[in-house]
Image (spheres, rainbow, N blue to C red):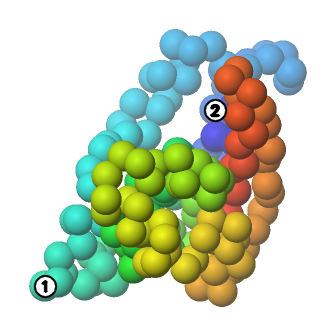
Amino acid sequence: LSIQGQINSRAPEAKLTSKLTADRDALPSPKDMKSYLYGKVSFRTENYIASIQPSQDVLLKNEKFDTIMCLSTSKYIHLNFGDQGINALFLKVYHQLESGGHFILEPQQWKSYKKEKSRCPQFKEMCESVIQLKPGLFLRYLKEIGFHHVKTIQYTCPSNKEKIVYVLKKA
């Protein structure tokens, strides 16, 4: 699925579009999409960083994905695990994506990190002395490890907060 929710032109999906819709501008019905996507799309929650065990090598795992999304979570990974955690996140995502796969990242702005400082002493220490790779540097770092920047989406959510979403592709 593309960002707009339409099916991309890759062969099996393009056939699905022509089978499900007589009108070129119409999208498949939710029921047809659910039937098509059943067993092909899954969501799971886990502590993605804590699941990296010292005895495991993420490169040896055969678990690969077409798309990995990290929406409004990078700040908490950063505050709990520091730069080492955010580096581990980005490297694990890169290695678990199929070639040509997409990483969709919504990093929070640095000012939102500062608001978290009062929540616990660890967050205060992370913000004041540990974190060097601030969110404004994420895109540059992601390019350095091999991602291609496809698109930046900027929007304002209902609470008037400015948000940014990066769409990146594994080369």
Front-most of residues 145 and 123: 123
Task: Determine which of the numbered discs, if any, sits on residue 32 in the image.
Answer: none
- Confirm or deny contact between disc 2 and disc 1 (CB under 8 A): no
To which residue does mark 2 refer? 16
Between marks 2 and 1 in the image, the one whose residue lies nearer the viewer: 1
| N-terminal label among 2 and 1 | 2
Q: Residues within 10 Å of mark 1 (few under 14, many from 20)?
A: few
Q: Residue at x 34, y 69 (%)?
A: 81
Q: Is residue 144 above or below residue 139?
A: below
Please state, as top left, top right, bottom left or bottom right, where the C terminus lies in the image. bottom right
Question: Looking at the rendering, which quadrant does residue 18 occupy?
Answer: top right
Give coordinates of residue 37: x percent, y percent: 47, 32
Q: Quadrant of residue 101?
A: bottom right
What's the residue type where badge 1 is placed? Ser
Residue shown at the point (38%, 59%) measured from the top left: 123
Look at the numbered disc 1 and give the secondary structure of its residue: loop
Q: Residue at x 64, y 53 (%)?
A: 111
Please say if 167 is above or below 20: below
Task: Using the image, tell me which numbered label, if any, was put on residue 55.
Answer: 1
Would residue 6 be seen by someone viewing this image from the given angle? Answer: no
Residue 3 in the figure: left or right of residue 38: right
Foreground of the two, 57 or 123: 123
Specify whether 33 is left or right of 5: left
Task: Tell me: residue 160, above or below residue 81.
Answer: above
Rendering coords of residue 36 (x, y %): 49, 29
Left or right position of 165 against 124: right
Q: Secondary structure at mark 2?
A: helix
Give the tally of numbered discs. 2
Q: Amino acid at mark 2?
A: Leu
